[in-house]
Amino acid sequence: MFTLHGELGRTVQVRSQQQSHAVTPVARASYKRSTVTAATRQVDVASEAIASTSSAATPRVAREVYQVSEAACCSTSTSAAQGVAGVDPTILAAVAGLGLTLFAVKRVLDTPSRKYDNNVGQEYDAWTEEGVLEYYWGEHIHLGYYSDEELERGYLKKDFKQAKFDFVDEMLKFSGAQGPKKILDVGCGFGGTSRHLAKKFRDASVTGITLSPKQVQRGTELAKEQGVGNVQFQVMDALAMEFPDDTFDLVWACESGEHMPDKTKYVEEMTRVLKPGGTLVIACWCQREETPAAPFSQQDKDDLQFLYDEWAHPYFISIQEFDRIMKGTGKLRDVRTEDWNKNTIASWRHSIWVGVFDPWIVVFKGPRIWYKTVREIVTLERMHQAFAKGLMEYGMMTGTKALPSAKPSETAADAKAPATVGA
């Protein structure tokens, strides 16, 4: 028996039958190879022992040759990693870190942060105090109107704030209202529309209501600065208005219905305070009508839920549902609806570009506003995508309150009539 001591301090025993000095030439050498796995190293150890016997009468001590090598498949060295990828591990780590960071940021931005919880007034208070919304959107917190010709020239060539004034003028035309004496602006924001209508109808009195005390304060300040004396603002819930029945000639509701937790009550209250013969006009973001033939996909539902929860919306309804609710009051006649998506959709991305061209108010506001602004940009783009693919529509609805002398059958017939949605 030969006792062979390897490099790692292990003992390898090789048994060899003693041969006489009459050994054949073929058997002058024998080779044995064994692979030993070290308990403390993940390497392959190849130990090769060469034991030689000669034809001499006395056996010679076997010579030992040990070769220890690491298997290429098990190498963890830097050079091996570089050989496989061809890229410095530092770069790989940086790319992986960036990927994880982007994934985390996307998860944060995809998680809504302002779910509806009777918090609309507080949200608008915050926006008013920050000043960013007013700086970019001006006096009007609603979408703008872009004519077909303006769209052909490119929406960026139009002044973003002017588009809002143009929208008010187009909405007034759509309503068909003529010379109203008492006007109610439901969900008036900073009061831009209220002041615009007050300037247009100098003999009229205009009242704007909102849930935000800060908006009432700012709207009043702007009215005083502009010398508009026939307008006033109040904090009031649109679902429980304090005005008597039959008070206003024109009830105006531009992009306030989105925040209402009860759309039917919203329409009924506005109809209640409207004078007989007066006009109700509504502009509202609407989701498309879901039908058995065109159900919402899971992706549609997820997209809508994000839009509900990011800007404090309880839910949206379709243009057709608004039509049914208005006719269902039994008091509104000549109800008309249209989809203004084509002439308003440019506002979403236009509002992003005005911030890109003039970012300084945000830059100087600090990290909290930076983060909030990034969230707004993401939501604006997701709004654009929802309108672009037809998941959302821009609803325009108007109707006239029936006169007391009108026969009940006239309004009942309207209620049974199908909704008509124009392009």
Image (tube, helix red, strand yellow):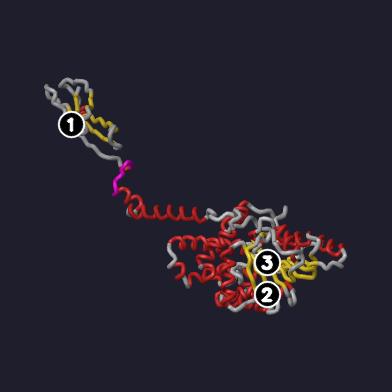
User: Counting other residues with Cα less than 10 Å from the Cα at mark 2, is it few (<14), some (14-19), or many (20 or more)?
Assistant: few
Residue drawn at x 56%, y 65% is 214
Region of the chain picked out in magenta, as a range: 73-78
- Inter-mark Cα distance, 3 to 1: 98 Å
- Asked whether, in this view, residue 115 is left or right of residue 421, the answer is left
The type of residue carrying mark 1 is: Glu
Decide which of 203, 54 is in the foreground and name it: 203
Residue 233, image quadrant: bottom right
Residue on which disc 1 sits: 64
- Identify the amino acid type marked 2: Glu
At label 3, counting other C-alpha atoms closer than 10 Å, the crowd grade (few under 14, some 14-19, many 20 or more) is: many
**Residue 72: x percent and y percent?**
31, 43
**Which of the numbered marks, if any, corresponds to residue 170?**
2
Label 1: how many Cα within 10 Å (few below 14, some 14–19, many 20+): some
Front residue (pair 266, 43): 266
Provide residue 16's location: percent of width, then percent of height: 22, 23
Amino acid type at circle 3 is Ala
The answer to whether mark 1 and mark 2 are in CB contact below 8 A is no
Measured as percent of width and height from the top left, residue 243 is found at 72, 64
Disc 3 designates what residue?
253
Q: Nearer the viewer, mark 1 or mark 2?
A: 2
Mark 2 or mark 3: whose residue is earlier in sequence: 2
- In this view of the protein, which residue sits in the foreground, 191 or 167? 191
Asked whether residue 22 appears in the rendered view, the answer is yes
- Tell me whether circle 2 and circle 3 mark residues in contact (CB < 8 Å): no
**For numbered disc 1, what is the local secondary structure?**
loop
Compared with 340, 3 (above or below) is above
Would you say residue 220 sits in the magenta stretch? no
Is residue 147 at all visible to an observer of this figure?
Answer: no
- Among the two numbered marks 1 and 2 on one chain, the one whose residue lies closer to the N terminus: 1
